[in-house]
Image: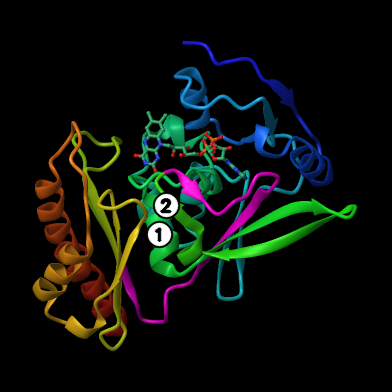
Amino acid sequence: MKPPPFTYHAPRDLGAALRTLEEIGAGGKVLAGGQSLIPMLNMRLVAPAHLVDINRVAGLGGVEREPGGVRVGALARHAEAERSGAHPLLTRALKLVAHPVIRNRGTVVGSLVHADPAAELPAVLAVLGGSVRVARWRDGAPVERDIPAAAFFTGPMESAVLPGELAVSAWFPDLAPGAGCAFAEVSRRHGDYALAGVCAVAGPAGAARVACVGVGPVPVVVDVSGHAPDWAAAARAVREETDPDDDIHATAAYRRYLVGVLAERALREAAQEAETLGT
Ligand SMILES: Cc1cc2nc3c(=O)[nH]c(=O)nc-3n(C[C@H](O)[C@H](O)[C@H](O)COP(=O)(O)OP(=O)(O)OC[C@H]3O[C@@H](n4cnc5c(N)ncnc54)[C@H](O)[C@@H]3O)c2cc1C
């Protein structure tokens, strides 16, 4: 199918992008990599009156190391962030996102704003306690706010980015010194969305957290530090926190079973990595 008609905007700088978004308000959508938005337009699942293409906006790219973490600009593609190797958990998660052609075009920030509960990157932001920086035009100048991951994912395909706002970057905090991480998921074919997935951060001193993919409306974050190093018990606790749905790909019961298996696997792997780092 073809998309419904829309007015196309291609601003060249951040001020112009923000002014345009402010003017068109709820009738507008940002176009970044287009790897989710274009299929949704073509299937007529969304019908914005205006598209603001940010691909020519200067200053929105880059994967930058800053003290305490990594900042990923709104135009940094999955492939660029993956190649940079800037953050071990982000790198692992990106290898599981779709296929190389999609990763060449899709953006890390776009994936976060899209907030698909089956996507890997929202879980990474959530388990690390990262944040997303958004900007809007107010009184003739851009103003920014940082939204912590815990408040960012508000429902399936819903984030806290408001009409008129542009997500300009995402912040992925470093792991604690000596911590290990892992991402385990099951999908029918490599590159497909996962039936369920778990990313885990473990150590040092028994600290352990997971964020689960595909088993709730938003990433399900569980602190299992109290169970370390009994990862089987930790996995049971994780399973109890999830509320998966049935769909054409898997039953809710299978997804809940799977998430426990994956949680135990990811926690063991992350803890093993932490142990290796400590020796
Ligand atoms: C065949 C296929 C398989 C895929 N498999 C996976 C997978 O396994 N795992 C996975 O996680 N993803 C998968 N994806 C999705 C892919 O990762 C997308 O790249 C990602 O969801 C969105 O990034 P984008 O830059 O393409 O955003 P777009 O498609 O351009 O936009 C997506 C949404 O986010 C909004 N948006 C984007 N950027 C901004 C911004 N800076 N500020 C405000 N709003 C913004 C848009 O308005 C739109 O609502 C798949 C896609 C395809 C086509």
Outermost front residue: 26
Region rendered in magenta: 157-181
Q: Return the x and y of residue 37 as percentages of the image width and height.
A: 52, 30
In this rendering, is residue 191 above or below 263? above
Mark 2 nearby-residue class (10 Å; few <14, some 14–19, many ≥20): many
Residue 31 covered by magenta stretch: no
Q: Which residue is label 1 attached to?
A: 124
Gap between marks 1 and 2 measured at Cα: 5 Å
- Relative to 222, is 150 on the left or the right? right
Please give the name of the residue rendered at 51% of the width and 51% of the height, measured from the top-left corner: 159
Q: Nearer the viewer, residue 104 or 257?
A: 257
Q: Secondary structure at mark 2?
A: helix
Q: Secondary structure at mark 1?
A: helix
**Res 52 → quadrant:** top right
Q: Tell me: is circle 2 under 8 Å from ligand 1.
A: yes
In this rendering, is residue 9 above or below 175? above
Query: Where is the C terminus found, in terms of image quarters?
Result: bottom left
Q: Confirm or deny contact between disc 1 and disc 2 (CB under 8 A).
A: yes
- Relative to 257, is 28 on the left or the right? right
Residue 228 visible? The answer is no
Q: Which residue is label 2 attached to?
A: 121
Q: Return the x and y of residue 12 as percentages of the image width and height.
A: 81, 36
Mark 1 nearby-residue class (10 Å; few <14, some 14–19, many ≥20): many
Please give the name of the residue rendered at 45% of the width and 32% of the height, measured from the top-left corner: 102
Q: Return the x and y of residue 265 as percentages of the image width and height.
A: 16, 63
Give the residue type that dot 2 points to: Leu
Residue 168 covered by magenta stretch: yes
Please give the name of the residue rendered at 62% of the width and 47% of the height, measured from the top-left corner: 74
